[in-house]
Amino acid sequence: MLELITFSTLNGVLYGMLLFMMASGLTLIFSMMGVLNFAHASFYMIGAYFGFEISRRIGFWPGFFVAPVLVGVIGGLIERYGLRQVHRFGHVAELLFTFGLAFVIEELVNMIWGKLPVDYRVPPSLDFVAFRLFDTTYPAYRIFMLATAVAMFVFLLVILKRTRVGLIIQAALTHPNMVAMLGHNVPQVFMMVFGVGAGLAGLAGVIAGPALVTQPSMAALLGPILFVVIVVGGLGSLGGAFVASLLIGLVQTFAVAINVSLADAIGPSAASLFGELGRAPLAQIAPVLPYLLLVLVLIFRPRGLFGTRET
Amino acid sequence: MTALLEVENLHAYYGKSHILDGVTFHIGMGEIVSLLGRNGVGRSTTIKAIMGDVPPVGSVRFRSREIVGLKPHQIARLGLGYVPENRDIFPSLTVRQNLMLGQKWAKQTGRWSMQDMFNIFPRLEERADTMAGVLSGGEQQMLTMCRTLMGDPDLIMIDEPTEGLAPMMVELVGKLLGEIAERGISILLVEQKLTIALKISHRLYVMGHGRIVFEGTVPEFNADARVRQDWLEV
Ligand SMILES: Nc1ncnc2c1ncn2[C@@H]1O[C@H](COP(=O)(O)OP(=O)(O)OP(=O)(O)O)[C@@H](O)[C@H]1O
Ligand SMILES: [Mg+2]
């Protein structure tokens, strides 16, 4: 039981921090532009594929540092020459633009790397057991992922709270016109935030790729969860996105883990005592849990956990 | 007196409604000019169009340079400062952070330092690390003006700074306007009440229906009873 709790907590926090690496950018971009970026998860996917491509040619570490930067630059260019041009046609046009972009990126990935998962592996330098609790082992690569995510979190916090650019971003979130009339180049700040947000999602892809599966559907699988995270947390709220990321990470991980141990402990026949639910194992319910949470939040707290405006 | 700002035949629209219908006026170096008029005649819109916040049609020259078509941040960087009428502070940032955002660059080199602001309004120093959103209306008004001054403008356009303020606060605002003028900064003051405007202005403009209907000095304005009656009194 202790090991179940320990490992599930670790995995849940890890999954949650990965979600936050993407949700943070998504929610910042939403606050600034008032537009949900449907292509945000695509940056995560591009990150994974770039990481894979660089790691098989040069090595994992060059990919780890270069791929997120490339994704960030691509994100910035998409904002500058795509989204900003579409902006004058209104929010619906912007939404459709990001929607279309997600499909374009998926098809491009299909064309270049094919439909099957690619062989993006954990680098040998990180391929060992970090520690052992009772008779379960915990891979070092996961610890590395967790450390990267935490480092990024601290980085983001320091930039936002301790630097001048962070102040400008914070003010521009709510009063973009006033900030511009004080002499700050708000469109450039938006482009930077979009780029950094895309880069962070890219980094999440680079480190998650070897641990999960790097395939063309990975963006489409993740995208909806990201929306759940930022709506549950409260649109535009970074703190809310953080709490919601961890919440969903932990809930999903524990749902899967508890199911496994339930089956072990009481056997399949006892599980069916729970009727329909018992027959559909908890592990199958796990993917639904975030959406259940979404519905509950929308009913009982439409602003989200930490939001200030109605969704 | 050489003109610092020349506005010529300025038009502005909100959707289909034609708000500014050919506004023409100018402000000289170091001059204090007031723009008067009844509610809704387009005084705020005039300032916003000059700043590029509302799309301007016509000509606006700042130090002889055409600024119609520039972005708001470019216009601000040329030396135009804007103090909005709704006290558009950043409520979730502290007073000090609000003032820092007034600076256009990381290094402050202008006429005003944060300490100057604190000397003029000791209240702001006392509340330097308080969230700006919890300040009183008067304190917020001071903060908005000081924030713009931190950007070291050569011309500051102030929209209704005394609206809704207690008499003591109005006096403080007047004191700051004097201080600004002393440092050679031009002022465009938009006001409803005449008290401060008549005391400090070199020249006055009165707006009506989206255009300028009177231009003159304070004595000229005082001599013209019709203007008040037709365009100011309600
Ligand atoms: N965002 C907007 N959309 C549509 N119409 C607007 C908008 N802002 C102002 N107006 C209209 O434009 C006209 C001029 O407004 P403006 O704010 O310039 O007036 P003002 O002279 O500053 O008066 P006051 O500040 O006392 O309201 C008004 O009739 C107002 O209703
Ligand atoms: Mg007004």
Image (spheres, coloured by chain):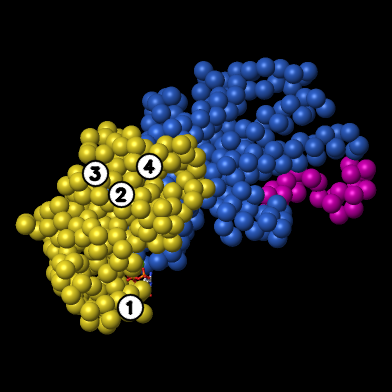
Chain colours: A blue, B yellow
For disc 2, the chain is B
Q: Are marks 3 and 4 in contact (CB under 8 Å)?
A: no
- Give coordinates of residue A231: x percent, y percent: 60, 53
Residue drawn where x is 51% and y is 18% of the image: A125
| Callout 1: CB less than 8 Å from ligand 1 | no
> Which one is nearer the viewer's eye here, A82 or A136?
A82
- Give coordinates of residue B215: x percent, y percent: 16, 72
Disc 3 to disc 4, C-alpha distance: 18 Å
Disc 3 to disc 2, C-alpha distance: 18 Å
Q: Are marks 3 and 1 in contact (CB under 8 Å)?
A: no
- Quadrant in the picture for the C terminus of chain A: bottom right
- Give coordinates of residue B223: x percent, y percent: 18, 75
Q: Residue A277 colored magenta? A: yes
Q: Which residue is mark 4?
A: B121
Q: Earlier in the sequence, mark 1 or mark 2?
A: 2
Using the rendered image, report if marks 1 and 4 lie on a common chain: yes
State whether residue B51 is above or below residue A14. below
Marking on residue B175: 2
> Which one is nearer the viewer's eye here, B41 or A278?
B41
Which of labels 3 and 4 is toward the front?
A: 4
Residue kind at label 4, given as amino acid type: Phe
- Looking at the rendered structure, the secondary structure element under dot 4 is loop
Q: Which residue is mark 3?
A: B152
- Give coordinates of residue A294: x percent, y percent: 67, 54
Residue B225 placement: quadrant: bottom left
Residue drawn where x is 46% and y is 43% of the image: B93
**Label 3 Cα neighbours within 10 Å, binned few <14 / some 14-19 / many ≥20:** many
**Label 4 Cα neighbours within 10 Å, binned few <14 / some 14-19 / many ≥20:** some
Marking on residue B233: 1
